[in-house]
Image (spheres, grey):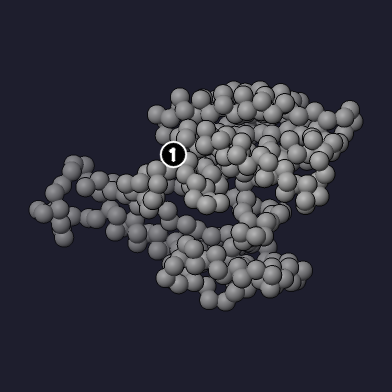
Amino acid sequence: MGVDKSGLTAFAKRERDRFERILKEFVEIPTVSAEPSRQRDIRRCADLAAQTIRDFGGEPSILETAGNPIVHGRFDGPTGAPTVTVYNHLDVQPASRETEPWDTDPFTFTKDGDRYFGRGTTDDKGPALTALFGIRAAREAGVPLNIRVLWELEEEIGSPNFEAAMRDNSRQLASDSVIVSDTIWVARNRPACPAGLRGLAGFELTLATGETDQHSGTTGGAARNPIAELMKLVCEMYDASSGKVKIKGFYDDVEPPSKRELEEFRRHLAAVPFALGIAQVDPIGRGVLRDDEQLLDARLDQPFRLAQHVGGRP
């Protein structure tokens, strides 16, 4: 098999049914790392991942950590060939038809035409298996590489044990290059090759305004409202109308895009109507930015603050 477009297309058609069968197995294991009750499912997925790597001719190992395991797979090539590692994660965010607009059960793999539905089909079990099938295609074509896969099961909770695991297993995990296969396609027919990712610094604000529970029917209007006070604080930190963070010094060490980067942004904009992506998540408008270049810069370059969850006791 060649690695040209026609050869890869033929390979994809030949392997599609098998890909879908394996993806179904992975999607239907609810690997929700944020829920301690899913530990058995996490372990079950790690075992399935190791067996799948083995079925593809690789040498799997499960690396234990202080939290969830990490799965590593070796596919050795010719002696002296460079080594590339492809990273993905197999844990997912919580999902429920009761609280989210799912038309199907999020942990049941569903196919509609050429679209797949189910938690993890896109983020990130589908891409992990796509990489695995890509490895098979490369090996069939005789590509001279040592290829590794590295599959994490704590990415969705901030990877608390990932750095320590890399350090503890550095000899086994040594690689000449790493590809992070947990990114986006700019459009359905246009893949992307991101050169960097924005990081995350998460925090939680907790406010307790009373020592005992009170009924709103008797104390409402007189008692303090902790949710309202928290929202006031959030609005003092973040301007919802412009998307700008109002915390003093927040942007002090942010480097503005260079002239060359701005030109590249413009070329992106000419090639793909990037603003269309906002329509998918903001169907009633274009978000807080009206200018296309501002929109592209905000999505690709600038830091931001996100207020994601608000909750209170009734």
Mark 1, other Cα within 10 Å: few <14 / some 14–19 / many ≥20: many
Find the residue positioned furthest to the bottom. 291
Image location of residue 114, percent across then percent down: 56, 51
Q: Which residue is mark 1?
A: 107
Depth check, front residue: 33 or 47: 47
Q: Nearer the viewer, residue 234 or 60?
A: 60
Residue 13, position as x, y percentages in the image: 67, 45
- Asked whether residue 39 appears in the rendered view, the answer is yes
The residue drawn where x is 56% and y is 35% is: 21
The structure residue drawn at horizontal position 50% and vertical position 46%, both measured from the top left corner, is 111
Taking the view exactly as shown, the residue that stands out farthest to the left is 218
Q: Amino acid at mark 1?
A: Phe
Residue at x 58%, y 59% (from the top left corner): 303
Task: Judge from the rendering whether residue 132 lies leftward or rightward of residue 227; answer left or right.
Answer: right
Under circle 1, the secondary element is: loop
Give the image location of residue 76, x and y in percent: 80, 28
Residue located at (66% from left, 71% from top): 269
Q: Is residue 233 above or below residue 131?
A: below
Please state if 176 lies on the left or on the right of 313 as rendered.
right
Q: Nearer the viewer, residue 22 or 224?
A: 22
Please say if 25 is above or below 123: above
Q: Quadrant of residue 170?
A: top right
| Residue 309 appears in view | no
Residue 14, given in percent of the width and then of the height, sits at 68, 41
For the N terminus, the quadrant is top right
